Amino acid sequence: MSTKEIVCTNIELECACRIRRTLFLDCRGDDKSSPAQILDSEKPLLIAFHGGAGQPEQMEKLTGFMEMGSENDFFVAYPEGVNRHWNDGRDLPRRREIDDVEFLVKLVDHLRQSFPVDTKRVYACGISNGGFFTQYLAARAPGIFAAVASVAATVHEPMYKGVKPVEPVPIMFVVGKDDPVVPFCGGEIELASRKAGRVVAAEQSFEYWVAANDAELRFIETELPVLREDDPTRVLKRVYPAGENGKPVVACIVEGGGHAWPKGWQYYRERYIGKTSQQLDTSRAVVEFCFQNSRSD
């Protein structure tokens, strides 16, 4: 456990005539520097997006990023979507009129001005709707993120067919091969009989980002060590190395895993979302992957 006090606050920000809430961790605790910050005092920022019908507190319970941020000196932000959802480009009812990209850009700018954020080390991750949104942001808001991670979300069809990222960004996927909500082999997104568009197959999703990132299509695959002998799931890690001027793509494929944040809590009944694997510490893997990267501009 961290000995540093965890200072958690709610930040309210107006965007498009709406007041938007973000749960924020100031990793400095009570030891805050003077307003005249020097470069060495600037710290990374990790933004984590909840899934559909979620909220910031649930995302923190799922990921535990606040304790990690307090221990390792990085800011954490959990924004809340309008009506607990994100407009991730799927053109769904009650979302298409919400410009969440504008909100995110405004939020990052606000945090940069209010806290000593290292602008070269801003990262994003999300689960499900939040994972789709993370990818959409990487494509629609270039120049912000040094790396992103998408959990329980492949690439939805509208993005695959109509969105081309304008610059490479390192990306990591964590996907369950037995995900009943976002099917690994592609098809309809469905939870408890509610449908929400279609996704392409995971293989196509990885290849979409390989092309966007100018990465190598030939990947290196390894099986990760077993963490729990009583857990039948297994994790295969693929690395698509960066090309000469590109960025890497990494995919952790959870065999037997469902629509979940591996090693997180079982947030919904297993018969609807499948099994939550305990064979991958997803939060640590996300942080380690993201923090290997920083922007050079």
Image (cartoon, rainbow, N blue to C red):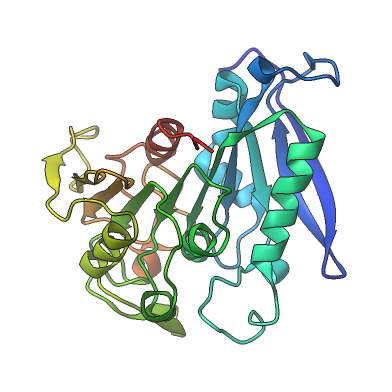
Q: Is residue 60 above or below residue 208?
A: above
160 relative to 215 in the view: left or right = right
Residue 37 figure quarter: top right
- Which percent across, then down, holds residue 22? 74, 50
145 or 61, which is in the foreground?
A: 145
Q: Is residue 110 above or below residue 130?
A: above
Residue 75 figure quarter: top right
- Which percent across, then down, holds residue 220? 13, 43
Q: How many marks?
A: 0
222 relative to 199 in the view: left or right = left
- Which percent across, then down, holds residue 165? 44, 64
255 or 75, which is in the foreground?
A: 75
- Which percent across, then down, holds residue 59? 58, 49
Q: Residue at x 84, y 51 (%)?
A: 12
Instruction: Pick the quarter of the image with the C terminus.
Output: top right
Q: Residue at x 41, y 79 (%)?
A: 190
Q: Residue at x 83, y 19 (%)?
A: 36
107 relative to 229 in the view: left or right = right
Instruction: Pick the quarter of the image with the N terminus.
Output: top right
Q: Residue at x 38, y 65 (%)?
A: 273
